[in-house]
Image: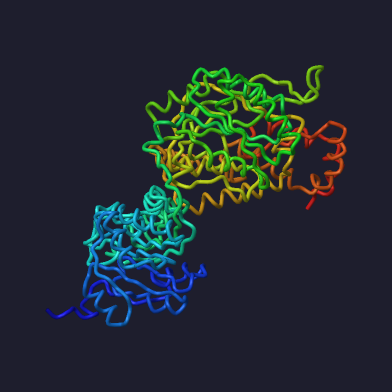
């Protein structure tokens, strides 16, 4: 019977620097492979990379394939090749040992084979045994089932098998990065390098009129935005990874069953030991104890680390066993939050800073809310209370409340208002684990303020929010001492605000039901009630007062009198400057009145004239 020609063979692919074969040769080029060693190419096909591999390394090439035509072609070229159909681990090892005949393996490759064979785990076990025995690196390549083109077509119930490519009709196994790494670890193969083949548009990029594939459709741009941070390898056509064999890794059968309900992330710099004690005391008194605590120490000195550890060690044993101390150095306020969320094991994650106070129902309300709204962000209600640092006979660094409870924060989550300013202190929210660990949302480490607002809004438009009117916590508002308000000047707050607003504006947003009517009502109200003299809606006093406060803070008078405020601060008479975009109307009134009635404002009147 006449053998097939090269052109008639469907899997005859040429070598190229930017395809699987070129990337494999590049990966193996990281090693100074032993002279006279063997490169074992399992499922070699027509041996597309054999010439280049032997050109780069003084090795002997051996190909193994089930197709006798491909093997005969290699033999005719003067290369060593053997016909063999992959089988069980025992049979595979016996066959390979026979053809090796005592020769040492220097490297191994199995390129685009595992998706075709029924017993791919036997194949992985085979190469793991050989890699461990010969200390040889293994390069594995499989098509990536998580390519954007496949994922977006599946959303439209499209599954188009082809003769070759990502959805080759002969494939009996599918792989994503996660599956490949998991099954390799299971058999003792640990990734040491990678060089994937990236294709913006794969062979599955058809039909072009499909809205999930059409470049300029809003649907495609929304989907691309959701997948951008997921680490989904959406543009990777073929996964090309290099492994070395060691001990197998045990993969948990179902980690979800063992997860606590809530991971509580508490960031601290070690400057508020008494408040940190109060936080842990609050957690000790929780009605629901299905939680873990991650105390994230940011830039702790040895002295402060010992102080934080002593506070943790002083807690009762049952809660001490739930606490982990994580040290983080460098970065800004967002860095410890990312570290905490990254290490969180809970189904939900919450932020509880070292100066916050929660009531005994804090965790319980989140868990009750999750019963009917699992997967949404869970929101309870915070009250604000003003505090000042004090010294007592018991502590040189504690605090005292100087106001009652202030109901500044609404019970319901208002998506539209949240696009303008933050109404939710971080401690009143619990975020589903998936938003961070699957969708890849991160706290933005390029900004030093409003990092929580930025994260909350981006997460809310993906998860949605479920609210309870129950008050569960106190948000401390520091009138004196260090806080985010005092550590960052108003210009930085303004700059970060504009940055975050631009970020929101550049993204496609998913609006929950009910907001279309709300937006329509807001537009109608503004059209009907616009004050033609100054451009403000007549009843929108809060917006007008925010604008006045903003004009004060950017005025020449404010800049000129900065040294006076510095002197006042040294003397313990710090000027209280509210956060313009989160301050209540009462706070704005107080700031505007104090500023405009001050002597410095009157003295510098001449500098405000145009």
In this view, which residue lies farthest toward the front?
Answer: 102
On the image, which quarter does residue 136 sit in? Answer: bottom left
Q: Residue at x 49, y 60 (%)?
A: 193
Residue 553 position (above or below residue 97)? above
* Vertical position of residue 41 compared to residue 391: above or below: below
- Position of residue 346 relative to residue 364, above or below, is below
Note whether residue 59 is visible.
yes
Q: Residue furthest bottom?
A: 77
Q: Position of residue 248 (x, y in %)?
A: 42, 47
Residue closest to the eye, 365 or 478: 365
Q: Position of residue 246 (x, y in %)?
A: 46, 51
* Left or right of 431 on screen, residue 164: left
How is this picture coloured? Answer: rainbow
Query: Relative to 393, is 432 on the left or the right?
Result: left
Using the image as rendered, state which of residue 10 and residue 369 is in the foreground: 10
Q: Position of residue 171 (x, y in %)?
A: 25, 59
Q: Is residue 447 left or right of residue 122?
A: right
Q: Residue, x 49% and y 58% (percent of image)?
A: 192
Q: In terms of image quadrants, where is residue 427?
A: top right
Furthest residue in direction left, as rendered: 1
Residue 425 shows up from this direction: no
Locate residue 392: give its quadrant: top right
Residue 58 in the image: state x and y as whole percent.
46, 76
Q: Quadrant of the N terminus?
A: bottom left
Query: Of 137 and 59, which appears nearest the observer?
Result: 59
The mark total stands at 0
């Amino acid at each position: 019977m006449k053998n097939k020609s090269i052109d008639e063979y469907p899997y005859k692919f040429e070598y190229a620097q930017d395809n699987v074969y070129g990337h494999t040769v590049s990966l193996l080029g990281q090693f100074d492979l032993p002279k006279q060693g063997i490169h074992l190419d399992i499922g070699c096909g027509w041996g597309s990379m054999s010439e280049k591999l032997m050109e780069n390394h003084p090795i002997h090439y051996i190909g193994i394939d089930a197709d006798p035509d491909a093997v005969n072609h290699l033999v005719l070229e003067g290369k060593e090749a053997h016909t063999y159909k992959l089988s069980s681990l025992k049979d595979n090892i016996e066959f390979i040992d026979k053809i090796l005949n005592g020769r040492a393996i220097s490297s191994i490759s199995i390129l685009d084979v595992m998706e075709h064979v029924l017993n791919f785990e036997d194949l992985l076990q085979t190469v793991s045994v050989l890699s461990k025995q010969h200390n040889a690196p293994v390069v594995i390549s499989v098509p990536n089932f998580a390519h954007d083109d496949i994922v977006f077509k599946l959303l439209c119930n499209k599954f188009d098998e082809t003769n070759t490519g990502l959805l080759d009709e002969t494939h009996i196994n599918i792989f994503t990065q996660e599956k490949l790494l998991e099954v390799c670890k299971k058999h003792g193969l640990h990734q040491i390098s990678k060089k994937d083949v990236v294709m913006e548009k794969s062979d599955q990029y058809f039909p072009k009129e499909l809205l999930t594939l059409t470049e300029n459709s809003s649907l495609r741009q929304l989907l691309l935005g959701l997948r951008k941070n997921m680490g989904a390898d959406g543009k990777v056509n073929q996964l090309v990874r290099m492994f070395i064999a060691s001990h197998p890794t045990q993969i948990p059968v179902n980690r979800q069953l063992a997860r606590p309900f809530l991971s509580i992330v508490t960031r601290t710099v070690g400057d508020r030991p008494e408040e940190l004690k109060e936080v842990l005391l609050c957690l000790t008194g929780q009605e629901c104890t299905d939680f873990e605590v991650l105390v994230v120490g940011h830039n702790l000195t040895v002295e402060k680390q010992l102080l934080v550890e002593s506070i943790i060690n002083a807690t009762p044993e049952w809660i001490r066993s739930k606490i982990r101390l994580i040290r983080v150095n460098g970065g800004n306020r967002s860095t410890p939050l990312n570290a905490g969320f990254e290490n969180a094991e809970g189904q939900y994650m919450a932020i509880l800073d070292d100066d916050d106070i929660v009531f005994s129902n804090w965790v319980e309300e989140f868990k009750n809310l999750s019963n009917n709204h699992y997967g949404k962000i869970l929101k309870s209600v915070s009250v604000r209370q003003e505090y000042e640092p004090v010294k007592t006979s018991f502590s040189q660094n504690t605090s005292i409340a100087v106001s009652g409870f202030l109901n500044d924060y609404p019970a319901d989550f208002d998506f539209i208002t949240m696009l303008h300013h933050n109404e939710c202190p971080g401690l009143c929210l619990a975020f589903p684990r998936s938003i961070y660990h699957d969708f890849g949302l991160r706290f933005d480490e390029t900004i030093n303020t409003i990092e929580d607002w930025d994260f909350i809004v981006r997460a809310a438009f993906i998860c949605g929010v479920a609210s309870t009117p129950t008050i569960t916590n106190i948000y401390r508002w520091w009138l004196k001492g260090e806080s985010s308000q005092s550590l960052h000047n108003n210009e930085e707050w303004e700059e970060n605000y504009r940055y975050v607003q631009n970020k929101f504006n550049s993204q496609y947003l998913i609006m929950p039901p009910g907001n279309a009517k709300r937006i329509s009502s807001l537009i109608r109200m503004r059209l009907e009630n616009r004050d033609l003299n100054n451009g403000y809606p007549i009843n929108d006093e809060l917006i007008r007062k925010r604008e006045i406060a903003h004009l004060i803070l950017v005025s020449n008078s404010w800049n000129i009198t900065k040294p006076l405020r510095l002197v006042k601060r040294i003397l313990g008479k710090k000027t209280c400057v509210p956060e313009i975009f989160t301050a209540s109307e009462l706070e704005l009134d107080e700031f505007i009145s104090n500023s405009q009635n001050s002597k410095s404002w009157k003295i510098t009147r001449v500098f405000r004239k145009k």
